[in-house]
Amino acid sequence: MKPNSDSQQDARLDTLLRRLPDMPVASNFTARVLQSVEREAPAASDPLLKLADLWIFRPGWRWLPYSAVVATALLMGVYSYRFHTQAARAALAQNMAAIAKVSPQLTAADLQDFNVICRLGQAPDKDLLALMQ
């Protein structure tokens, strides 16, 4: 019976409000209402103030964003170092394979001689090849 009595009271209030005469509204009514809304709820309009209410920015958790940035930087550094060392190893392996293809008859003693290594990249002397044949 309680909901019925509430609806009856609402109906009576509606009829009383309809009997009231219309009052003139001030010309700056909208501006005054918007100013009062801005004064009462500054946190609702500023997204940075909403962000400050998150649990990670509370005094006991202020270290969390900083530690996340440090951990990310550390992981990126480790990954970059690993990528660099793998690329260097791959380049070394390719160079060793190229040396093995170019001169399979070279010995370890030949590879220690700087002059022999320098001549590996040069084109053969055509006159010398002609004399050898």
Image (spheres, rainbow, N blue to C red):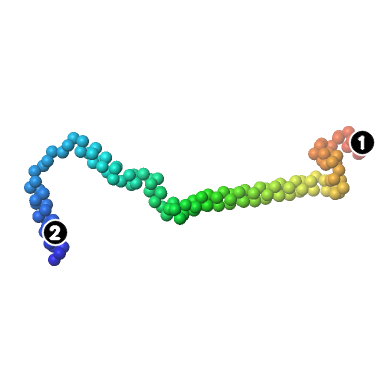
Q: How many badges with numbers are in the image?
A: 2
- Taking the spot 47% from the left edge, 52% from the top edge, the residue there is 62
The residue under label 1 is 131
The answer, for residue 105, to whether it is visible in the render is: no
- Taking the spot 79% from the left edge, 48% from the top edge, the residue there is 100
Quadrant position of the N terminus in the picture: bottom left
Q: Position of residue 53 (x, y in %)?
A: 39, 51
Q: As displayed, is residue 5 above or below residue 58?
A: below
Q: Position of residue 82 (x, y in %)?
A: 65, 51
First in sequence, mark 1 or 2: give its number: 2
Quadrant position of the C terminus in the picture: top right
Question: In the image as oriented, which residue stretches furthest toward the bottom?
Answer: 1
Q: Amino acid at mark 2?
A: Ser
Circle 1: is it few (<14), some (14-19), or many (20+) Cα within 10 Å?
few
Q: Secondary structure at mark 2?
A: helix
Q: Is residue 34 left or right of residue 103?
A: left
Q: State the residue in front, 73 or 43.
A: 43
The answer to whether the residue labelled 1 contacts the one labelled 2, judged by CB atoms less than 8 Å apart, is: no
Q: State the residue in front, 94 or 130.
A: 94
Question: In the image as oriented, which residue stretches furthest toward the left?
Answer: 19
Q: Position of residue 76 (x, y in %)?
A: 58, 49
Question: In the image as oriented, which residue stretches furthest toward the front?
Answer: 59
Report how far apart the C-alphas of labels 1 and 2 lie in the structure. 120 Å
